[in-house]
Image (spheres, rainbow, N blue to C red):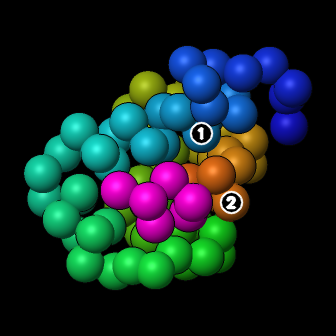
């Protein structure tokens, strides 16, 4: 994982995944209804929704760069 921060997130991949989920009402409601989150649970839900990565990702390999702990922590806060 890169040490370079992106918009306050660990990296662009982490920011991108959160952006896609939190900017869609259906996705947001689904996330909030499934709390609490572990990194594994967050990853499982995202891979179910975006098995090939988000539309903005160059490849599904970018999902390997997502900081799932940071995603789970953010979703548990909102």
Q: What's drawn in magenta, residue-wise? A: 72-78
Mark nearer the viewer, 1 or 2: 2
Which residue occupies the foreground of this view, 21 or 55? 21
Which residue does the numbered mark 2 point to in the structure image? 69
Which residue occupies the foreground of this view, 56 or 17? 17
Cα–Cα span, label 1 and label 2? 10 Å
Q: Quadrant of residue 29?
A: bottom left
Q: Secondary structure at mark 1?
A: helix
Which residue occupies the foreground of this view, 42 or 76? 76
Residue under the image location 44 percent in, 59 percent down: 77
Is the N terminus in the top left, top right, bottom left or bottom right quadrant? top right
Q: Is residue 61 above or below residue 75?
A: above
Q: Quadrant of residue 32?
A: bottom left
User: Which circle marks residue 34 in the picture?
Assistant: none
> Residue 52, image x and y in percent?
50, 49
Camera sees residue 63: yes
- The answer to whether 6 appears left or right of 33 in the picture is right
Residue under the image location 59 percent in, 39 percent down: 14
Is the C terminus in the top left, top right, bottom left or bottom right quadrant? bottom left
Q: Would you call the spot at circle 1 few (<14 residues within 10 Å), some (14-19), or many (20 or more)?
A: many
Which residue does the numbered mark 1 point to in the structure image? 14
| 37 inside magenta stretch | no
Q: Earlier in the sequence, mark 1 or mark 2?
A: 1
Camera sees residue 47: no
Q: Secondary structure at mark 2?
A: helix
Q: Is residue 27 above or below residue 18?
A: below
Q: Would you call the spot at circle 2 few (<14 residues within 10 Å), some (14-19), or many (20 or more)?
A: some
Query: How many numbered marks, from 0 up?
Result: 2
Residue under the image location 33 percent in, 48 percent down: 21
> Residue 3, image x and y in percent?
87, 26
Q: Dominant secondary structure of the magenta stretch?
A: helix
> Quick check: marks 1 and 2 in contact, CB under 8 Å?
no
């Amino acid at each position: 994982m890169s040490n370079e921060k992106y918009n306050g997130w660990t990296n662009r991949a982490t920011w991108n995944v959160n952006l896609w989920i939190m900017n869609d009402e259906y996705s947001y409601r689904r996330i909030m209804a499934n709390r609490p989150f572990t990194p594994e649970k967050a990853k499982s839900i995202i891979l179910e929704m975006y098995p090939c990565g988000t539309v903005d990702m160059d490849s599904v390999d970018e999902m390997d760069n997502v900081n799932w702990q940071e995603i789970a922590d953010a979703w548990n806060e909102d």
